[in-house]
Image (cartoon, rainbow, N blue to C red):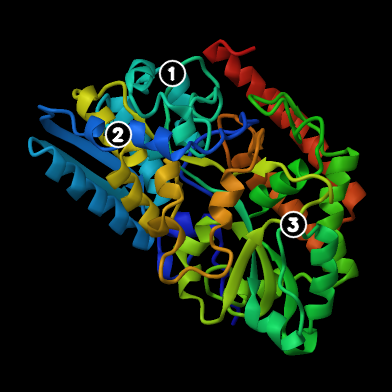
Amino acid sequence: MKSKLITRRRFLQLSAFATASAATLAACAPAAQPGAPAAPSDTQAADVPTTAPSTAAGLTGQIEYMHYDLGPANQSREEAVRAFEQANPGAKVKLSVLPYDEMYQKVAATMAAGQPPDVIYGDFSLLRYALEKQLLDFSDYFKADPVLSKPDLFITDMTDAVQAKYGTSRMHALIMGTWVPILYYNKDIFDAAGEPYPTDDWTWDDAREAAKRLTKPEQGQYGLQFGTTFDNVGWLWWLQKPDDFWAVPQVFPAKTAFDSPVGLNVMRLYYETSVVDKSQITPDENATYQVYAGGFGAGKVAMFSGGDWDAGWSFRDLQFNYGMALIPKMRADYRPALNTMLSTNAIAAATKNPDLAWAFARFLTADKEGATIIGRGAYETPVLKEVAMSDAVLKPEWAPQGYDARVRAAALPGPMYTPYPLNLNLWEFPSKFLDPTIEKLRKGEMKPEEAVAYLDSEGIPYFAAQREEMKKFGIE
């Protein structure tokens, strides 16, 4: 009997870390982001305290912090709550943890009842609440903050109009961490074949040739596996230095543009590695492995194109030696900064204690102690540069070769591109159209030219309808 492959999105839905892997996500919104600032000098870092401001005198009362189940990373949230309460004896934080889907159902119900959680760890599913002004605009808190107002102290732009503000002129999501694409590789498979390990200079042509040499179907061994389709399609897209994204424009798109040279190149990579080279593990065979990341997690695939969250979720427990490198380039002369989403915390406008809610959200982002706790959880890389570059984050005892790629990728010069269009329903289009199309490509049931034509035939009317719905929020 075939076992069900545990994917990233399925992991979030199941909230069972031991056997699982979505949807992405905890985090914020898409589109191009300004480049990350240059590293501060030792003097700059020393001039700005990163502890005291988050422990404001006189904070009292109780707030609720809701997040979805992060498996072992839940411990980092529990530790952060304890540290915050210890620093603020008059404050209490109630931690509420639910499976991914259930959390958003709960948020919807409590928002409608006017009694939402005070602080919410979230993603695109919160966009509607931002547009409806049910999330607190914390612009004034942010601008007055002695740490957050210093952009050189962070590895990413904390004020980006899309990433931090959900496409509005207000600030609704305080960035806590980054997620970036990573090429994981099974060192044991490479060593047995006498193959050199992937490097940051690799192109997808290099990866493709290595994958062919490392594929041994008679042994059930394959050279390549892609992680979540939604992520990888977006990364492969931006790696080509296109003029635009497949969703046009990327913020509140009105149509798609798959039927283009860039779109064809993305679909051809899936098709050719699967059907022509036969080096990509097949969907059916991948589904036989009931472990996180399927064939790669089981030690049967040489390379896996995923995100740095995989290292924190389950790869630390892999039963083989592995390494990490930056995702291969599509063009030898070009490497853009890519992310997935940015993990964020939003504050409900209905909170009865906005000062305490802000202080707690800020503690997780801009306080050295809080950010270090989040970093040790390894679910995301904290954005406070001093912490992101620290041994506590970059050198956990289980870290594989190349683990610092998660920070090197986040600190690449911008603009930073994310693989998602900003709309009202993050997962509907990929679930209905993109995922099934990629699966057909991998099975040889559809050719790249057919795939891009089909995706536009569905995507253009889909996003036109979404655009109409946006008019109720004053977005034309």
- Considering every residue shown, the one lying at the far front of the view is 43
> CB of mark 1 within 8 Å of CB of mark 2?
no
Q: Earlier in the sequence, mark 1 or mark 2?
A: 2
Question: How far apart are the alpha carbons under marks 1 and 3?
Answer: 40 Å
- Seen in the picture, residue 1 relative to 386 is either above or below; the reply is below
Question: How far apart are the alpha carbons under marks 1 and 2?
Answer: 35 Å
Identify the residue position indicated by label 1 in the image.
132
Residue depicted at x 78% and y 79%? 214
Identify the residue position indicated by label 3 in the image.
328
* Crowd band around label 2 with a 10 angstrom C-alpha radius: few (<14), some (14–19), many (20+): few
Residue at disc 1, secondary structure? loop
Front in this rendered view, residue 456 or 357: 357
Residue depicted at x 87% and y 38%? 259
Residue 427 horizontal/vertical position (percent): 58, 42
Residue at disc 2, secondary structure? loop
* Crowd band around label 3 with a 10 angstrom C-alpha radius: few (<14), some (14–19), many (20+): many
Badge 1 amino acid: Glu
Identify the residue position indicated by label 2 in the image.
49
Q: Which quadrant holds the C terminus?
A: top right
Badge 2 amino acid: Pro
Residue at disc 3, secondary structure? loop
From the viewer's perspective, is the residue at label 1 or at label 2 nearer? 2
Residue 361 appears left or right of 222: left
- Seen in the picture, residue 394 relative to 40 is either above or below; the reply is below
Q: Earlier in the sequence, mark 1 or mark 3?
A: 1
Front in this rendered view, residue 38 or 111: 38
Question: How far apart are the alpha carbons under marks 3 and 2?
Answer: 38 Å
- Seen in the picture, residue 470 relative to 380 is either above or below; the reply is above
Residue 78 appears left or right of 185: left
Q: Is residue 182 visible?
A: yes
